[in-house]
Amino acid sequence: MTDAFLLDPTSERTPQVRPRLPRPATLEGLTIGLLDISKPRGDVFLDEIEAGLSKLGLRVKRFQKPTVARVVPPDMEREIARECDVVIEALAD
């Protein structure tokens, strides 16, 4: 599947078809960003993900939104895009 329906929670009225980005063949040599959206226990989930990725010798960078109630600040979004090749976002409660 190359396209997906995504609903933008910031006021999108009808779903739009957007092409999926290609997945990397391997994570070796890539920087993996872990984004904590500040929901309770998201950090616990990402701690486990980071431990597993680090055990595999992969490079990991952590980021945390200031609050769950707002989108990622533009400066943080640019930093993640500049410094990371792939991103895992934590949603937990």
Image (cartoon, rainbow, N blue to C red):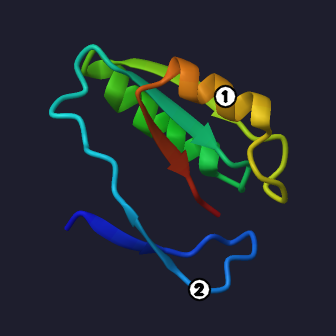
Q: Residues within 10 Å of mark 1 (few under 14, many from 20)?
A: few
Q: Find disc 1 in the rendering and name its residue.
A: 78
Q: Amino acid at mark 1?
A: Arg
Closest to the observer, 53 or 22: 22
Q: Is residue 19 above or below residue 51?
A: below
* Number of other residues with Cα within 10 Å of mark 2, as a class: few under 14, some 14 to 19, many 20 or more: few
Kindly give the residue lying farthest to the bottom in the view shown: 14
Dot 2 or dot 1: first in sequence order is 2
Q: Secondary structure at mark 1?
A: helix
Residue drawn at 44 percent across, 30 percent down: 50
In the rendered view, would you say 23 is above or below 82? below
The residue located at (35%, 60%) in the rendering is: 19
Between label 2 and label 1, give the one nearer the viewer.
2
Single out the residue that lies furthest toward the left.
25
Q: Position of residue 73 (x, y in %)?
A: 80, 39
* Structural distance between the alpha carbons of marks 2 and 1: 27 Å
Of 86 and 46, the residue lying toward us: 86
Residue at 77 percent across and 36 percent down: it is: 74
Q: Which residue is mark 2?
A: 14
Quadrant of the rendered structure where residue 28 is?
top left
Q: Position of residue 12 (x, y in %)?
A: 67, 77
Locate the C terminus by quadrant: bottom right
Q: Are marks 2 and 1 in contact (CB under 8 Å)?
A: no
Q: Residue at x 47, y 38 (%)?
A: 87
Q: Percent x, y for residue 79?
A: 65, 23
Name the disc covering residue 86, or none. Answer: none
19 above or below 67?
below
Q: Name the secondary structure under disc 2.
A: loop
Q: Nearer the viewer, residue 56 or 25?
A: 25
Amino acid of disc 2:
Thr
